[in-house]
Image: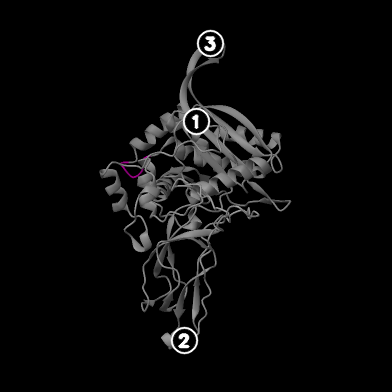
Amino acid sequence: MSIEILMPALSPTMTEGNLVKWHKKEGDVVKAGDVIAEIETDKATMEVEAVDEGRIGKILIPEGTEQVKVNQPIAILLEEGEDASSLEGLKEKVTLEKKPEAKPEMTQPSPEKKPELKVVPQAPSSPQERIFATPLARRIAEGAHLNLGSISGSGPRGRIIKADVEQALAQGGAAPLAKPSALLTGYEPEYEVINPSNMRKVIAKRLVEAKQTIPHFYLTIDCEIDTLLKAREQMNARANGAYKLSVNDFVIKACAVALEHVPEANASWINDQIYQYKTVDVAVAVAIDGGLITPVIREAEKKGLGEISREMKDLATRAREGKLKPQEFQGGTFGLSNMGMYGIKDFSAIISPPQACILAVGMGEERPVVKEGLLTSATLMTCTLSVDHRVVDGAVGAKYLKAFKELIENPVMMVL
């Protein structure tokens, strides 16, 4: 019998996605493992593989369709021996959900005058109006502050593609910015309304949820990294190009080893229970277009610095290209956010549920210090641990940071 191909849930937060492209057409033979489509989620654009064998009998959702609900049928797969006649009588099971249109308020008409329906013009980029565009076209338009609502699409079903955006830029760019809305005070400068991406919407929702539901507290410590910097320089010099360690590679390793010493911090609060993990999977924040994503270094406590360095570079590169698989950015047990490369001295990160801790790392900076009563200087790195108090108490958090500091200041201990 025929098999429904459903819109997959490619991340825990995904409720809908955009069907960017079909790699198979009706009539094509499909084998398990074949790439059949590209789906844009709240995290990235990912390839979807077939799990069954057969032949594409009917495509229910055309490519370029946005906001397709998870588990909604997108195609019908015919098994061996079935033909197009198997589709006869198949009822349409999928209808694209449209946002409810605002209905005019019903008023009692005056006997002297017929009622009029007044339409208030809205900016084309209002969040209430769906604009069909490819992810690449959206990114280019966003970077150029171009109003997508002012562009006519030449793609399938009027979808705006890269060439349309480039043509609009060549002809003078964006439509005039929207005038101040009557909903505001009227004293604001000119502005444009930007329809946020799926990723930005999910980030906003999850961070509000985290700050409202997780009882955060923060612990800060300064780590001296002069010994680490010398060790890094020596190790890179002897690597002969096999790898190039960064300070962040040492930080990832130290996070993991410290959690081995203090396993109480490697836990989550889920459904009023504490889940304490047996391995350390460090989720590292990586900035990408339109937001951020957290690739995961699995079992980081068991990996050497060279392996961590190679894996992190590969994950970060593919994260920025939107090519990570779900298992590569889901399920971390501990979070790490390093903004030292941006010149940030110190900051506090928001916990990503269900993790109980995230470490915020600032830049290494030469500062005056007092050693044995004498004023000297040292390279210090400020680290702030954000903690879920439901899982980790202050004493446990302090114990963890103490273990982390010892490892950072004595990097040889990471390889023992």
Residue 264 in percent (x, y) is at 67, 44
Which range is magenta?
A: 240-244
| In this rendering, position of residue 34 left or right of residue 386 | left
Answer yes or no: is residue 269 visible.
Answer: yes
Pick the front one: 229 or 149:
149
Reading the chain from its start, which is encountered first: label 1 or label 3? 1
**How many residues crowd mark 3 within 10 Å: few (<14), some (14–19), many (20+)?**
few
Numbered disc total: 3
Pick the front one: 135 or 126:
126
The answer for how far apart the CA atoms under marks 1 and 3 are is 55 Å
Reading the chain from its start, which is encountered first: label 3 or label 2? 2
**Mark 1: which secondary structure?**
loop
Q: Which residue is mark 3?
A: 374
The answer for how far apart the CA atoms under marks 3 and 2 are is 87 Å
Vertical arrangement, residue 147 with respect to residue 83, above or below: above
Type of residue at label 2?
Ser
Q: Which residue is mark 2?
A: 86
- State yes or no: discs 1 and 2 in contact (Cβ < 8 Å): no
- State yes or no: discs 1 and 3 in contact (Cβ < 8 Å): no
Q: Which residue is mark 1?
A: 188
Pick the front one: 352 or 396:
352
Is residue 114 found inside the magenta-colored segment of the image?
A: no
